[in-house]
Amino acid sequence: MRRTLLALVSATMLAVAMVAPTTAITGNYVEDFDHPFVGLIAFYSDSEGTDDGFIHRCTGSLVDDGTPADGSRVVVTAGHCTDDGTGDAVAVSARIWFRQDAGTRYDGTRDPLTGYPDQCIDDPAVALDACATAHEMYNYGFDNFAGFPNHRDVGVVILDSPVVLPEYATITTAGAITSNKRVDLTVSGYGITDGHAASDPTVSFRERLMAVTSLITTTNNNTASFNLATQPNGGRRGGTCSGDSGGPVFYPASSNTIVAVTSFGIINPNDCHGHDYSYRLDRQEVIDWIDEVAGDHWDQ
């Protein structure tokens, strides 16, 4: 979900229409069957995860806990995703679907195959891929972009039970991005596509898509080494939009290694054309925080 931040525009004197959390893959995107560990994650204000308690939906990645055969319980996403909307607390519960087309049959009530947005269908004859619930989550300190550009936009969700997948994401090492050299990155997420605005936060493309983008800079006023700025999206250029928040940014582009999570965008008011920004995980203090909150569930 994107939240408009006009105050941030004023404070940084950006000549753009909107700055907002990136809440979908745009431009030169393809269906993403390469990253089965990237899931569509919904957050709720109640412990049962009901439709009435739905807050917003994002993208998250199941990361390797060191014993992949036993599955993993640790999902990395954005801090504004685990945030309950108040800026000072996390959501009560969450639910994540790892199916590529997790919500494409959503008709305003429920996807009959997966149960999105408020149920995990556990009939193996119907639900072909994993779905899991969570009641433990953490926010690195995201508070409605306070402290920007170090707005601490990282979140961790601990699943109630392990999910076994054929492969998992890994967290990068510190200092993976060392310069402003224009390198390729891959982004993945369940957000809306170019030109498909969504006024209802439950409505978006709800399908895992991926695109290749490229690094622009790490050193302008909006990055200051805390964020990665990537190419303006739109047209045939790959980028992110509403619903991709918390989704992985892979570097190298062909790897499963997450160097950042999709955070916010500087966009035109009626579409997702504009620069994308992702919050960097390749900083030792961030890696240490993930290790701390994941506890025994993950050992980087």
Image (spheres, rainbow, N blue to C red):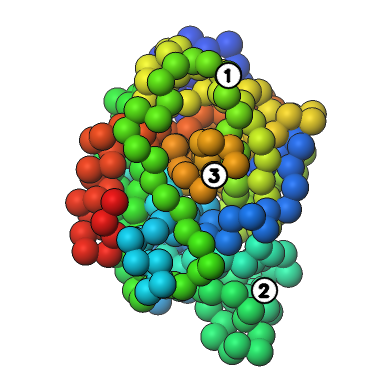
- Under circle 2, the secondary element is loop
Placement of 45 over or under 60, stated as above or below: below
Q: Amino acid at mark 2?
A: Asp
Residue displayed at 29% across by 59% down: 298
Residue 92, visible in the rendered structure: no
| Front of the two marks 3 and 2 | 3
Rendered location of residue 254, percent (x, y): 60, 42
Residue displayed at 58% across by 61% down: 36
Q: In the rendered structure, find residue 288 and report the number of the disc placed on it.
A: none
Of pointers 3 and 2, the one earlier in the residue sequence:
2
Placement of 130 over or under 202, stated as above or below: below
Q: Residues within 10 Å of mark 3 (few under 14, many from 20)?
A: some
In this image, 242 relative to 142: left or right?
Answer: right
**Camera-side residue: 151 or 29?**
29
- Under circle 3, the secondary element is loop
Q: Residues within 10 Å of mark 1 (few under 14, many from 20)?
A: few
**Camera-side residue: 233 or 254?**
254
Residue beneath disc 2: 111
| Front of the two marks 2 and 1 | 1
Placement of 204 over or under 73, stated as above or below: above
**Camera-side residue: 95 or 231?**
231
Residue beneath disc 1: 182
Q: Residues within 10 Å of mark 2 (few under 14, many from 20)?
A: some
Q: CA distance from mark 1 to mark 3?
A: 17 Å
Of pointers 1 and 3, the one earlier in the residue sequence:
1
